[in-house]
């Protein structure tokens, strides 16, 4: 009789927890929308200030001022980069784009100890670096700013430990959505590049936050400049089209390999150069200023220059080649500096100019017509992003979303798929994955021997209903705590139920290998 009574009590407790878990999920989804709103507001301010400062900068150089104004502005930019370098020295986590750092926080490698201060520093550092002319993007800082907001909101709302990574991922996705007004791509980048696990809660919270952030961006920037690009699909036979797509994928794959190798090599060499910071910043400002005097829109990421070429581009093949190489070289220097700023936009610009070059050559040999060049440019932008970032879904959906041209979707799938295959043959790794591996292999991370991963048990998962003492976890993995209803339970005496927050301790070098298997044990997918 007692046995049946225990079973009845167990079912009652379990049923109550499942209903409570649904309410907790609803709260999480609502909070993720708050994260999206806050991220959207801040990321849109970031985007607007960049646009405003770059516009002032462009007007200054177009006005051809007296020589002494150039000296004053040069010294101002030099001082700005020195200040940003100081911020990075004090807070290393704000360096670069921020996607590797965001992934590190979600994995448990990194803890944001002072998220508000770092958020402000990342915001200011990113704006000042691009305003000074460096070839950096707004998307990486927007992603990390979103993760900072996710971290802050999780603290303010007392979100459960196992759900914090969902808010971090939601904030990161919302940052990209606000940067490009692309909510679908924002969800995909979290799955493909940051969280790297398709847990349903992560997908839902990221999509909700991304939609809200994208709506905020749409209100502030109602006219998307990419929508002004006119695209004309070439009239080609199926066989000729496939040959051209195959050739385009081969060219992009080889160019992507060169781009990635040089970018990573220069970044590693730059950190080892013993020159004082003020000397490094002097040369960086000097290069940016010289390029500004020749073509100001090629600095600050080069996005405005790309849009000009897409709407009314040059037909000189050698000129486009020279400009593409100049932009690439400057992007290498800018990204290698480690100053706050992403590499998505420089990558898109290089890919777009490469597509323009391939399109001009095709026009020369009568394969396509001049109006078809932008069609090749958009496909090339998507495929080049696939080659560098190794995120095919994000790249294809992002270009389709920001341009609104669905006629390039299927060609982008074909060329992007071929590019992904060819870059596999070339043994290419994602640029952000390489940066992440360099980061976790640095001396600062090697000092820590053990890390803790928090997961939430979902209904129907492998862990659901299992006694902790009966579980066979990977070697050196130990469940150190089970949190339920505001209480910490003794793991050895606990049977897991949905909603339990389980903390698993493991060796630090095993996080990347065991993250997905351990999370999948607690999830239903």
Image (cartoon, rainbow, N blue to C red):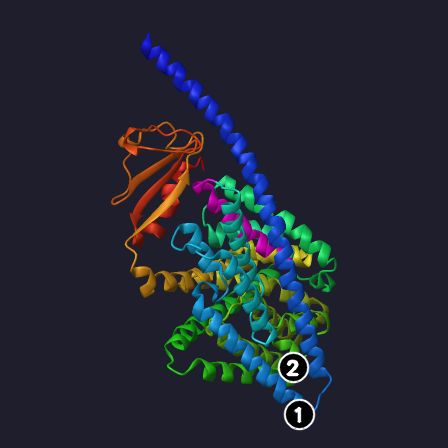
In which quadrant is the N terminus drawn?
top left
Circle 2 sits in a helix, a strand or a loop, which is it?
Answer: helix
> Which is more N-terminal, label 2 or label 1?
1
Any part of residue 354 in sight: no
- Say if 84 sits above or below 502 in the image: below
Res. 295 mark: 2
Is residue 170 located in the magenta-colored stretch of the structure?
yes
Is residue 166 located in the magenta-colored stretch of the structure?
yes
Give the alpha-carbon distance from disc 1 to disc 2, as whole Å: 18 Å
Any part of residue 452 in sight: yes
Q: State whether the magenta stretch is mostly helix, strand or loop.
A: helix
Pointer 2 local density, CA inside 10 Å: few below 14, some 14–19, many at least 20: some
- Residue 265 drawn at (x, y percent): 40, 74
Q: Residue at x 36, y 77 (%)?
A: 272
- Please say if the residues under marks 1 and 2 sit with CB atoms less than 8 Å apart: no
Task: List the single residue furthest toward the top.
Answer: 1
Residue ID for mark 1: 67
Circle 1 sits in a helix, a strand or a loop, which is it?
Answer: helix
Magenta range is: 160-180
Q: Nearer the viewer, residue 66 or 327?
A: 66
């Amino acid at each position: 009789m007692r046995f049946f009574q225990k079973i009845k009590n167990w079912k009652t407790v379990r049923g109550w927890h499942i209903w409570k878990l649904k309410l907790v999920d609803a709260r999480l989804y609502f909070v993720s929308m708050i994260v999206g709103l806050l991220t959207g507001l801040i990321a849109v301010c970031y985007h607007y200030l960049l646009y405003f400062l770059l516009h002032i900068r462009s007007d200054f150089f177009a006005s051809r001022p007296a020589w002494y104004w150039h000296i004053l502005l040069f010294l101002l930019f030099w001082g700005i980069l020195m200040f940003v370098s100081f911020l990075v020295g004090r807070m290393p986590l704000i360096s670069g784009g921020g996607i590797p750092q965001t992934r590190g926080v979600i994995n448990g490698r990194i803890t944001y100890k002072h998220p508000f201060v770092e958020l402000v520093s990342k915001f200011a550092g990113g704006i000042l670096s691009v305003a000074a002319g460096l070839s950096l993007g707004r998307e990486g800082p927007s992603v990390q700013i979103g993760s900072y907001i996710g971290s802050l909101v999780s603290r303010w709302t007392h979100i459960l430990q196992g759900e914090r990574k969902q808010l971090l991922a939601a904030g990161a996705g919302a940052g990209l959505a606000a940067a490009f007004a692309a909510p679908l791509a924002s969800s995909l980048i979290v799955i493909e590049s940051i969280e790297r696990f398709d847990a349903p809660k992560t997908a839902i919270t990221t999509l909700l936050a991304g939609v809200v952030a994208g709506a905020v961006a749409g209100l502030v920037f109602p006219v998307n400049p990419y929508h002004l690009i006119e695209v004309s699909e070439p009239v080609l036979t199926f066989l000729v089209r496939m040959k051209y797509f195959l050739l385009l994928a081969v060219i992009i794959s080889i160019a992507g390999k060169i781009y990635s190798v040089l970018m990573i090599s220069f970044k590693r060499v730059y950190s080892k150069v013993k020159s004082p910071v003020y000397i490094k910043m002097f040369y960086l400002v000097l290069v940016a200023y010289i390029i500004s005097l020749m073509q100001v829109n090629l600095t600050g990421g080069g996005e405005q220059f790309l849009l000009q070429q897409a709407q009314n581009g040059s037909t000189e093949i050698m000129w486009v080649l020279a400009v593409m190489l100049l932009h690439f070289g400057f992007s290498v220097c800018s990204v290698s500096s480690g100053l706050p700023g992403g590499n998505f936009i420089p990558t898109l610009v290089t890919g777009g100019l490469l597509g323009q070059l391939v399109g001009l050559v095709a026009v020369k040999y009568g394969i396509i017509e001049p109006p078809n060049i932008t069609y090749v440019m958009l496909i090339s932008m998507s495929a080049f992003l696939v080659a560098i970032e190794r995120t095919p879904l994000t790249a294809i959906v992002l270009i389709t979303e920001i341009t609104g041209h669905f006629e390039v979707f299927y060609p982008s799938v074909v060329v992007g798929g071929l590019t992904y295959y060819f870059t596999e043959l070339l043994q290419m790794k994602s640029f952000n994955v390489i940066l992440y591996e360099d980061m976790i292999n640095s001396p600062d991370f090697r000092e820590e021997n053990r890390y803790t991963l928090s997961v939430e048990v979902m209904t129907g998962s492998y862990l659901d209903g299992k006694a902790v003492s009966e579980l066979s976890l990977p070697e050196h993995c130990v469940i150190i705590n089970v949190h339920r209803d505001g209480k910490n339970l003794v793991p050895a005496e606990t049977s897991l139920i949905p909603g339990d927050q389980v903390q698993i301790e493991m060796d630090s070098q095993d996080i990347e290998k065991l993250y997905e298997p351990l999370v999948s044990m607690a999830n239903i997918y």
